[in-house]
DNA sequence: GCATAACAGGTTTTT
DNA sequence: CCTGTTATGC
């Protein structure tokens, strides 16, 4: 009896196929993690491959940890020397060794999306870019996709020739890069792009890693982007022992640059590739699987595969509708309590999934009220809370004095009486002398016009220098504590005395605990816990990594976060057109967005093992305004006989082909309103048209009452001009204004 | 320089 | 609705 006996035929095949390119198309719940871990075990135990020569790339740190653990269970040794990591942490590890070849210090800082935003803002200010015309977000995403597509500044400038606005973006990109380098910092996308550059320009470095990684495995391959593809291609080029695992039906990260072609065209790029399909699902009931298959079959251009299962038929899928989101939440929470009390499913067996993080709130409120343990994954990340970022900024300042962003963030936190005027003077001096902000601080008395600020600035520098000097002598935990005390950060919070400040103090404490955990974890491996390592870990953790399966709590998260997880009892909530599929994709001319949303629906449905509940609310508050929506088009794609619609559910099954069209039409009318015809107005509260026309009196939630002066069609929306009694004439878009006839 | 008030603007999903 | 930025008054 060997460990491989538990695998089915295809799984075995995938496991034993160790040489050459291999594509494993693994449907949801088809046991791909088992295959991967067994394959690694097979390489090590049977083929005599040194664990040191194996590289496995996963999407999250959590998946990496689990994989290592499982291999260790199978093989019994050696798992610690396998490289199992995420793309990002792998790149950091490589760059820390070699990035000096690209002109950076090896102790570079990693900028998260907040830092990125701050930096872009500064760039815009410096280049006089009007952020009303060029939105920060647009610039960030332009830069990010450039890096994902490996477009350098030079290249972008060339492409932008003759196009003024693209040139402005390219200018921003150039300045952004300049600042990053000056700060000795890399953003998330840089981690990948710079590694590719490193390999391309340094053949010997590339060869070193090619010779090290004789066997490469990539999980969740459908979500890789161009630069990740290139990275793998480079590494695998020499030995070609590349095994990728993925499911094109679960490709849900296009917005982040993921290129579904990577998986669809794998066989074109690697013509000698073996392709193995895992179509047997071990996770879900027949009912759930059939539902998932029915939905996804509406997509085009998929790899041909059909999931099947030997599992029981199982319960029908429950579909419930509610008047509003509040009732929806109440039902779901009640239901979880009911099954828990009946001993059917523990809290940890239940998961609530939704499209947007904002939807978590009403559930959270109910859970808090009733004292039920729950865990929200995602949303505001622990490490992006203000107080946590402040402390981290101190640590970054100490670790990498060139990180101007960090220094400027904390120079007056807590208050030291250092204001904008002083900061600007230092900044100007630093820019003029081409030195870092902190360097300028150290020679503050040379700065002209600095005036009375000098003393305060000097004591700040003295503080940082003092911290730097003791850093070497202290362990990580002690040092973080020391920083928190010495900077007066905690004291300042304590002085505030508010409830909010108390919460912040707890978070700082929590950060200290994290440092302790980190130090402990490192100690177990015999390594010292350096400050840089800690900052790096903190920069690369995802919220999902903190999910603990042994804890008995209900898990709440977005559909995106849920990928790769499974639960016996799942609630898919907010199944409404405009929420899911999202408003954005419904309005978009490009229909591929809908396909991606549908894949997300597929991911959601296939998370459920036994019991699946779908809910939607007819009325929901979005951006402070009540929005009426209809059931999600995806619900209409489900075969009726799989559904239990409950008592208060009534609908006729619509023409299937038209669901998308209908969804879009209804939504267009609801959100943006049609013609301003008076005869629409009749009392029916759910009228699809504008309920007001020219000359009508309307009420706005902020501006009060007024008279509609004008209605003009503007693109997809209507521009309404209203003469308000209190604030005068205002122009607004009907879709956003939320005007009510009075 | 700082605290507070007023206000504009905006939304998916995240390593 | 909620956040983040600007205006205002001390």
Image: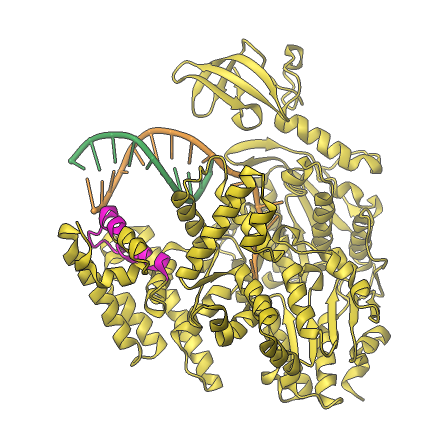
Chain colours: A yellow, B orange, C green
The image shows residue A22 at horizontal and vertical percentages of 79, 72
Please tell me which residue lies in front, A370 or A503.
Answer: A503
* Residue lying furthest top: A695
Please tell me which residue lies in front, A437 or A335.
Answer: A437
Is residue A279 rendered to the left or right of residue A497? right
Is residue A28 rendered to the left or right of residue B12? right
Q: Quadrant of residue A716?
A: top right
Up-down relation of residue A653 to residue A345 (above or below)? above
Asked if residue A421 is among those painted magenta in the image, a careful observer would answer: yes
Up-down relation of residue A604 to residue A51 (above or below)? above
Residue at 65%, 79% (x, y): give it. A210
Asked if residue A523 is among those painted magenta in the image, a careful observer would answer: no
Q: Quadrant of residue A232?
A: bottom right
The image shows residue A191 at horizontal and vertical percentages of 54, 64
Q: Which residues are magenta?
A: A403-425
Is residue A367 rendered to the left or right of residue A392? right
């Amino acid at each position: 009896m060997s460990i491989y006996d538990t695998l089915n035929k295809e799984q075995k095949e995938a496991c034993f196929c160790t040489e050459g390119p291999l594509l494993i198309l693994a449907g949801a719940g088809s046991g791909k993690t088992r295959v991967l871990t067994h394959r690694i075990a097979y390489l090590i135990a049977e083929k005599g491959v040194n664990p040191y020569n194996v590289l496995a790339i996963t999407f999250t740190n959590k998946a990496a940890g689990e994989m290592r653990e499982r291999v260790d269970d199978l093989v019994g040794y050696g798992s610690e020397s396998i490289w199992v990591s995420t793309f990002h942490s792998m790149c950091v590890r490589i760059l820390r060794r070699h990035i000096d070849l690209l002109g950076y210090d090896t102790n570079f800082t990693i900028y998260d999306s907040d830092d990125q935003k701050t930096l872009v803002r500064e760039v815009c200010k410096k280049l006089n870019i009007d952020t009303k015309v060029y939105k920060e977000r647009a610039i960030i995403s332009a830069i990010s996709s450039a890096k994902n597509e490996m477009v350098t500044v030079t290249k972008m400038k060339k492409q932008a020739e003759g196009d003024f606005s693209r040139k402005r973006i390219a200018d921003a990109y150039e300045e952004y890069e300049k600042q990053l380098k000056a700060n000795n910092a890399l953003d998330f996308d840089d981690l990948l792009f710079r590694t590719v550059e490193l390999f391309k320009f340094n053949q010997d470095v590339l060869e070193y890693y090619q010779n090290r990684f004789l066997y490469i495995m990539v999980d969740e391959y459908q979500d890789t982007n161009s630069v990740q593809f290139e990275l793998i291609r480079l590494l695998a080029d020499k030995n070609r022992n590349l095994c990728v695992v993925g499911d094109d039906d679960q490709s849900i990260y296009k917005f982040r640059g993921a290129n579904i072609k990577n998986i669809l065209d794998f066989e074109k790029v690697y013509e000698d590739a073996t392709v193995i399909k895992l179509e047997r699902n071990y996770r879900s009931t027949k009912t759930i699987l059939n539902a998932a298959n029915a939905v996804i079959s509406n997509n085009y251009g998929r790899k041909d595969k059909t999931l099947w299962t030997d599992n029981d038929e199982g319960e029908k899928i429950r579909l419930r509708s509610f008047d509003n989101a509040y009732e929806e939440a109440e039902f779901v929470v009640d239901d979880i309590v009911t099954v828990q009390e009946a001993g059917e499913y523990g809290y940890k067996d239940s998961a609530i999934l939704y499209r947007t993080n904002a939807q978590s709130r009403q559930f959270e409120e109910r859970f808090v009220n009733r004292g039920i343990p729950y865990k929200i994954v995602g949303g505001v990340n622990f490490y992006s809370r203000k107080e946590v970022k402040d402390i981290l900024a101190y640590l970054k300042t100490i670790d990498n004095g060139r990180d101007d962003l960090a220094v400027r963030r904390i120079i007056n936190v807590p208050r030291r009486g250092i204001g904008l005027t002083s900061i600007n003077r230092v900044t100007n001096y630093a820019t003029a002398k081409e030195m870092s902000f902190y360097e300028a601080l150290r020679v503050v008395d040379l700065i002209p016009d600095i005036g009375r600020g000098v003393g305060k600035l000097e004591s700040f520098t003295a503080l940082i220098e003092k911290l730097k000097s003791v850093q070497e002598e202290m362990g990580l935990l002690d040092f973080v504590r020391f920083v928190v005390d010495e900077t007066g950060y905690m004291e300042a919070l304590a002085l505030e005395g508010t409830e909010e400040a108390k919460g912040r103090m707890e978070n700082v404490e929590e950060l200290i605990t994290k440092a302790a955990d980190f130090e402990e974890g490192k100690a177990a491996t015999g390594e010292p816990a350096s400050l840089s390592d800690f900052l790096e870990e903190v920069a690369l953790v995802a919220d999902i990594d903190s999910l603990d399966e042994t804890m008995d709590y209900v898990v709440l998260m977005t559909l995106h976060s849920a990928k790769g997880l499974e639960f016996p009892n799942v609630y898919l909530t907010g199944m409404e057109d405009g929420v899911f599929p999202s408003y954005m994709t419904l309005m978009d001319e490009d229909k591929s967005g809908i396909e991606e949303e549908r894949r997300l629906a597929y991911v959601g449905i296939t998370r459920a093992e036994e019991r699946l509940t779908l809910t939607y609310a007819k009325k929901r508050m979005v951006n402070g305004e009540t929005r009426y929506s209809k059931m999600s088009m995806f619900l209409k794609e489900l075969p009726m006989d799989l559904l239990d619609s409950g008592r208060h559910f009534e609908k006729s099954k619509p023409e299937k082909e038209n669901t998308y069209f209908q969804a879009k039409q209804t939504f267009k009318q609801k959100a943006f309103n049609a013609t301003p015809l008076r005869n629409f107005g009749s009392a029916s509260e759910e009228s699809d048209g504008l309920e007001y026309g020219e000359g009508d009196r309307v009420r706005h939630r902020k501006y009060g009452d007024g008279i509609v002066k004008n209605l003009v069609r503007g693109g997809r929306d209507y521009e309404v001009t209203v003469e308000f009694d209190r604030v005068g004439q205002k122009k607004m878009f009907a879709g956003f204004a939320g005007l009510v006839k009075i």
